[in-house]
Image (spheres, rainbow, N blue to C red):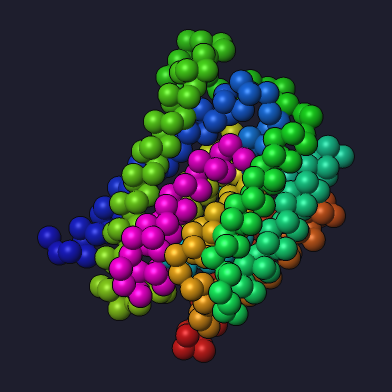
Amino acid sequence: MSALVITLTLLIACAVVIYLSCEFFTNGVEWLGRSLRVSETATGTVLAAFGTALPESVVTFVAVAFGASVASKAIGVGAALGGPLALSTIAYSVVGCGLIALRRELPKTPETRVQFRRLGRDQTWFLGIFAVKIGLGLVAFAGKPLLGWLFLLVYVVYARVELKGAAETETEAPAPLRLSPGSATPSLIMTLTQTVAALAVIFVASRLFVEQLERLGPMLGMRPQLIALIASPIATELPETMNALIWLRQGKHRLALANISGAMMIQATVPTAFGLWFTPWRLDPPLIAGAVATAVAVSIMAATFSRGLISRRLLAAMGLIYVAFIAALITLRL
């Protein structure tokens, strides 16, 4: 059996494992949010997003902190920039395509408009942080690593606002906990056990997925930097995308969108801090092109969420921005 066939087989197997693990994780994190009495939106933007963003954050950390070569450092920086790109284009597009496939429209109620405006606020937060993140990649100065702590502080403030700012709670109980199907209200210990165990499997499967993807790059003649910017984030964002599909199938569009929005906030801050601490954090043309595509996508989301004009077709169309980005890389030979 050829190395290419083995690599592709492992990629598919990891994707299946990630999907099944996300079924357990989403079920567990919903019960965790209910036990902690946080809002459904905060459950998606903070609890679920923090868990599913761990794989890509670890990829960045391992590459920049333990990588000995210049290429390894470049992979870490590329992953830190590629994550928000994949989330703001592909992940939102998957939600839109999922809604179309399920023949469901997004609700247009006053309550939904309020929820969308909150997500629009999150996108605006992201744009401000992202602008600073990119600006730092264009200049060099001695104190740059110290700013990594500022990015972590920004995320702590954001998470605190999300957890305390919403008064609404989930009125409909989640599906029975997978590890305790006969219990109407599972214990916190069982809930934590299922959530943490599922997260551990997601973490391991995502790491293996990325490793196979990195092996696939040379087989296809792709540079490590492009793998980090284009392919690796698609792999590491699988948990968020899978969670979104699962929640859409259950009719929970708010959790699906909130999980993506919250993951974007993590990607704008935590991996950036790692990059600032362990690399010069200088962006080359492909990374700048990716940053521009990300800014365009998030600007559209911020404007439409804030006005309550979001639709499934607009979400589906976000994937075209990613296609345009790839076309630009090819056309400009970046």
Instruction: Tell me where residue 115 appears, x and y as whole percent.
Output: 78, 42
Instruction: Tell me where residue 53 appears, x and y as whole percent.
Output: 51, 48
- The N terminus, quarter of image: bottom left
Instruction: Tell me where residue 302 appears, x and y as whole percent.
Output: 76, 59
Query: Residue 9 or 70: which is nearer the viewer?
Result: 70
Residue 77 visible (yes or no)? yes
Residue sitting at x 43%, y 31%: 196
Residue 258 visible (yes or no)? no
Left or right, residue 7 beside residue 301: left
User: Which residue is outermost to the front?
Assistant: 142
User: Which residue is outermost to the right?
Assistant: 110
Left or right, residue 329 beside residue 64: right
Query: Residue 280 or 297: which is nearer the viewer?
Result: 280
Q: What stretch of residues is rendered in magenta? A: 46-75
Residue sitting at x 37%, y 57%: 62
Residue sitting at x 62%, y 67%: 133
